[in-house]
Structures are given as C-alpha cells and as structure tokens.
Amino acid sequence: MKILKVKIAAVLFMTVSLGYSQEKKMMHQDHHKMEKGEMKMMDSKIPKFNNEKITTAYEDYLTLKAAILKSDQELAKEEAEQLLGALGEFEGTGQLKKIVTKVTTSPNLEAQKGAFSEFSNAFASFLEGKIADNQLYLARCPMANNNSGGFWLSHEEAIQNPFFGGKMLKCGSIQETIK
C-alpha cells in the first residue's frame, strides 16, 4: 500500500512538473513574439510610406545596411537579394535593381560598400515624396570607400556610419532631409 502511494505521488509530481514546464515554454515563446512586436512599435521614427510595398523595401534596405555594418559579405548578399525582390514590385526601378545587383555580385566587401553607397543615394531620390509620416536622412561619410565618400539612409538624425564595421560609427554628417 505504501509503495502504491509513493508511485501515485511520483506520477502526480511528474504530471504537474511536465505541465509547468510546457506552460513556461509557451510563456517564453509568447514573450519572444511580444518583444519582436514591441520592438517594431518602439521604433516609431521609421517613416510611414504612401505604399506598404515601399515600407517593405525600406525595411529590406535596413537589413542590408545592418549587414554592411557587420562587415558580413555573405549576409549583405542575401539581404540585397531580398531587397531586389521587394524592388521588383515597382515599375521604374530598373536602375535601382541594377545597383542592388552589384551588391549581390560584388567580389568583396569593399565593392559591396561602394554599391551600397550608390544605391543609398539613388534610393533616396526614389523615396522622395513617398513618405506619408516622418522623414529620412541621407548621410555621408567622407572617409568611406577609400576617401571617395559613402552615403546611407537613416530614419534617425544621429549618425551611425555603416562603412567601418562599428569602428567609426559617428563619422559623417546629414546631407539631406527627405520627406
């Protein structure tokens, strides 16, 4: 009888423990989902565009910029391919697609950075007049791309230079405000 009570207690304990473990796991997953959603909501400076597809293209641009900042050539190639797909949704983006293709086919990171700068400048022109709420900044670092300069877009006025892998994050200045 005593053995039976111990077995029942053990089964009960395991059942309760397993249920708690699964509940804790589900709560962690929900928390992770919530963090992603909150992060997007917290970054309220990201402009709203006149077209949802432009928002997607800009978000893809941001992931490409992050890959350039990380100095990750392979990731930059993947993100540029994603951006290329987003640009395929628009007419009149042939030149933009041509420039982004340079990022995907560049033999090295330095060539990718040059193409990224060229794209940023052209993308700024494309986005002009398509922003419904907030604004963008076209920034330039004079030392990027072997001192020929490099451009990037930002939705924040604070400089965060993507060209030197995090070494010279504050090098550069705002060249233009895009609305």
Image (tube, rainbow, N blue to C red):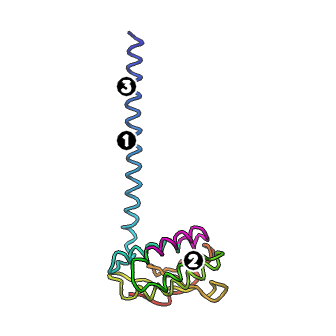
Q: Secondary structure at mark 2?
A: helix
Where does the N terminus fall, quadrant-wise? top left
| SS assignment at label 1 | helix
* Location of residue 44 by image quarter: bottom left
Circle 3: element type: helix
Q: Which residue is mark 1?
A: 23
Give whichever of discs 3 and 1 has the lower sequence position.
3
Spot occupied by residue 92 in the image (x, y as percentages of width and height): 41, 86
For marks 2 and 3, give the CA distance. 59 Å
Kindly tell me whether residue 72 is visible in this rendering: no
Foreground mark, 2 or 1, reads 2
The residue segment tinted magenta is 66-85
Say which residue label 3 marks.
Answer: 12
Residue 93 lies, in percent from the top left, at 44, 84
Q: Is residue 68 visible?
A: yes
The residues tagged by marks 2 and 1 sit, at their Cα atoms, a distance apart of 45 Å
Q: Is residue 1 above or below residue 27?
A: above
Which residue is at 57% across, 73% downward?
69
Q: Residues within 10 Å of mark 3 (few under 14, many from 20)?
A: few
Amino acid type indicated by mark 1: Glu
Q: Is residue 20 magenta?
A: no
Q: Quadrant of residue 70?
A: bottom right
Dot label at residue 103: 2
| Front residue of this view, candidates 32 and 103 | 103
Cβ atoms at labels 2 and 1 below 8 Å apart: no
- Of labels 2 and 1, earlier in sequence is 1
First in sequence: mark 2 vs mark 3: 3
Which one is closest to the eye, mark 2 or mark 3? 2
Look at label 2 and name its amino acid: Val
Q: From this view, report whether residue 23 is shown above or below residue 8.
A: below
Mark 1: few/some/many CA within 10 Å (<14, 14-19, 20+): few
Query: Is residue 83 found inside the magenta-colored segment of the image?
Result: yes
